[in-house]
Image (cartoon, rainbow, N blue to C red):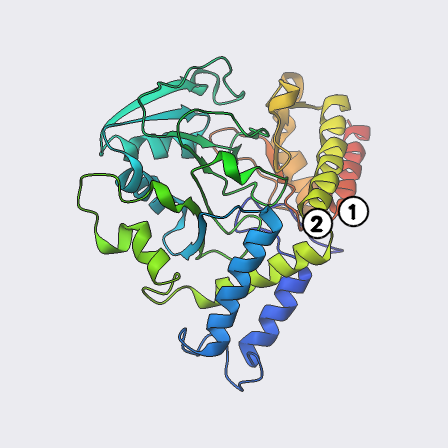
Amino acid sequence: MGKTHNFYAGPSILPQYTIDETAKAIKDFAGTGLSIMEISHRSKEVVAVMDKAVALFKELLNIPEGYQVLFLGGGASTQFMMVPYNLMGKKAAYLTTGGWAAKAVKEAKLFGEVVEVASSKESNYNYIPKGWEVPADADYFHITTNNTLYGTEIREDFDIDIPLVADMSSDIFSRPIDVSKYALIYGGAQKNLAPAGITFVIVKEELLGKVDRAIPTMLDYRTHIKSESMFNTPPVLPLFAALKTLEWLKNNGGIEAMEKVNIEKAGLLYDEIDRNKLFKPTVSVVEDRSLMNICWVMNEEYAALEKEFLDFATARGMVGIKGHRSVGGYRASTYNALPKESVVALVKVMQEFESMK
C-alpha cells in the first residue's frame, strides 16, 4: 500500500511537525531527561508551555484585551453545560444547525428558557437557516460554526446585539475571525489543534459573575481564569501538542494563509463531486458548504455502488472517508494539516472509479 491519506473527522490529521516534536518530548521533554507524560504540571517547563500556548492563541487570532484563553478538560460537550451555567440568567437563544448544536440546546434547557431561533433539522441539517431573529432579552445567542456530521459551515461573524457564543470545535484556525464580536468561543481541540483530551475556551471576562445561581467550582470559568488553567492537573501532553500546532500555524503564514489553502482544497473536491456522474453533494447551497468537512453521496442510480467505492478508495490509501451514519455516503475532512496532494489523490481515485462504470 502506498501513502495513507488521513481524512478522519476527529481525532484527525495533525501537522507532522506536531507529531515529531511531541514524540521527542515523550522521550525527553525540554532537556529535563523526563518524559512530558511524567513531569509535574507545576514545573517551570510545563508552565512555560501553557504561557506560550496562551500567547500564541492571542497572537494568531488577534484576541483583544479583556478576553481570557483557557485550556480545560471535558471536551466541547462539557461546554454545552458550562456556557449556560455561567451565562444564562433566565433565557438564551440557539441556532440549531446540526447534531452537536442540538445537544447544546438539550443541555441549556436544564438552566432556563431556550429559544430555538431556527433549525434545519427537517432537511437533515443540509443548510444553514437564514432570516432568523434573536430575542433582545436573551442572555446570549449560541451558534455552532461548522457542522462536522453534515458538512455545513457559518463563515461570517454575526453582528448581534446580545453576547454571541460559538462552538468552533472543527473550524478554529481555519479562517480569520473577529473575536471582538464574540462573548465566548469554545471547542474540542481534536480537529485542528491537538490530540483528544483538551478543550479551548476564549471568554470575555466582564460577562462572568452575573448569574444568581451557585456554580460548582470546577464549572466556573472564573476558577480557571484565576488559576491560569492550572486549578487541577491539565492534559499536559495534548497541551504540548497544541503549542506545537500553534507554532506550525505561525511558521506557515498564520490563519490567512490557512484559509487560502483550505478554500483551494475544498474547491478541488467540491468541483469533482459536482462534475462526477456517480456522486452528488449533500449540501446544495454553495455558500453553506463546509471547507472542513465535505460530505457527498452516490447519485440515486448508482446507490448500489456505495460500499464498492468505499472499499476501492480505502484500498488506495483514502482513510476515514466513510460518512457519518446519520448522513451516509462519504465525508472527507480537510483540516489545516491535510496537504493539498491528499485531496488531489482522492479526486484521482473518484475519477478512476467513474471511468470503470
Residue 90 appearing in the image:
yes
Callout 1 crowding tier (Cα within 10 Å): few <14, some 14–19, many ≥20:
few
Residue 94 x/y as whole percent: 38, 26
Which residue type does callout 1 highlight?
Glu
Question: Element under label 2?
Answer: loop
Residue depicted at 64% across the width and 34% down the height: 291
Q: Quadrant of the N terminus?
A: bottom right
Which residue type does callout 2 highlight?
Gly
In the picture as drawn, the residue positioned furthest to the top comes out as 131
| Viewer-nearest residue: 72 or 102 | 72
| Viewer-nearest residue: 161 or 339 | 161
Q: Quadrant of residue 244?
A: bottom right
Residue depicted at 36% across the width and 30% down the height: 140
Residue depicted at 18% across the width and 41% down the height: 213
Residue 12 x/y as whole percent: 57, 50
Q: Which residue is mark 1?
A: 341
Q: Which residue is mark 2?
A: 317
Of marks 1 and 2, the one in the foreground: 1
| Viewer-nearest residue: 330 or 231 | 231
Residue 129 falls left or right of residue 264: left
Residue 323 x/y as whole percent: 55, 35
Name the N-terminal-most of marks 1 and 2.
2
Residue 270 falls left or right of residue 31: right
Residue 106 falls left or right of residue 324: left
In the image, residue 131 sits, relative to residue 290, either above or below, namely: above
Cα distance between the residues tagged 1 and 2: 12 Å
In the image, residue 4 sits, relative to residue 243, either above or below, namely: above
Q: Quadrant of residue 137?
A: top left
| Viewer-nearest residue: 153 or 319 | 153
Find out whether the residues at labels 1 and 2 contact each other: C-beta distance under 8 Å: no
Residue 242 appearing in the image:
no
Q: Quadrant of the C terminus?
A: top right
